Amino acid sequence: MKVFASLMILLTLWTPYRVQAQQTLDAETGLIVDEGIELIKTYCLACHSAKLIVQNRATLEGWREAIRWMQDQGLQKFKPETEARILKYLSENYSPDKQGRRSPLIIENWYRLN
Ligand code: HEC
């Protein structure tokens, strides 16, 4: 009985940890907490909210292009190792194979409203 009780306690303690370990969101920005998040918070939120980042998915190349485009808007240039860390964060946490909250809708029949 004692063993069973300890097992139950272990299980209850362990379960929320597992769920959390998969993906924790930063309360302030909604960004996925992972290595490199501080760089995103420092450099990517000066002009717009993190929502623009969170709702996007791209490959590493895609994110590199996004950074280039942001640089045309005024984002500073980075040292290669800083850019690599930013790209690692973005491409691992916001990659095309990580779905958003729901899969895209598949619309089979469009209809006119008028
Ligand atoms: C100098 C200002 C500035 C900075 C700094 C900046 N952005 Fe942007 N970003 C913009 C502007 C302007 C837009 C377009 C906003 C709009 O469409 O309303 C944008 C849009 C975006 C979008 C949406 C693009 C789309 O196609 O919908 C993403 C994703 C994005 N930024 C990511 C980033 C990331 C990642 C960083 C940090 C590396 C960053 N931004 C830093 C100016 C900036």
Image: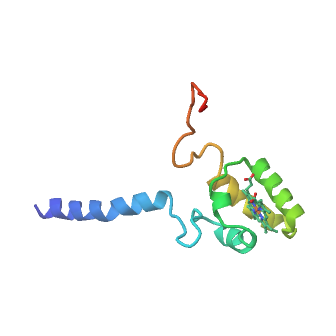
- Residue closest to the far left: 1
Number of marks in the image?
Answer: 0
Ligand 1 is found in the corner quadrant, namely: bottom right
- Residue closest to the far top: 109
> x, y percentage for residue 2?
13, 64
Pick the residue in front: 102 or 36: 102
Could you tell me which residue is drawn at 63 percent across and 54 percent down? 55
Could you tell me which residue is drawn at 57 percent across and 25 percent down? 108
> x, y percentage for residue 76?
86, 70
Pick the residue in front: 66 or 87: 66
Vertical arrangement, residue 82 with respect to residue 68, above or below: below
Q: Is residue 2 left or right of residue 102?
A: left
Q: Picture quarter containing residue 43?
A: bottom right
Instruction: Indicate how the structure is coloured in the image.
Output: rainbow
- Residue closest to the far front: 114
On-image quarter of the N terminus: bottom left
Q: Picture quarter containing residue 105?
A: top right
Could you tell me which residue is drawn at 56 percent across and 31 percent down? 106
> x, y percentage for residue 24?
50, 63
Pick the residue in front: 2 or 93: 93
On-image quarter of the C terminus: top right
> x, y percentage for residue 50?
65, 65
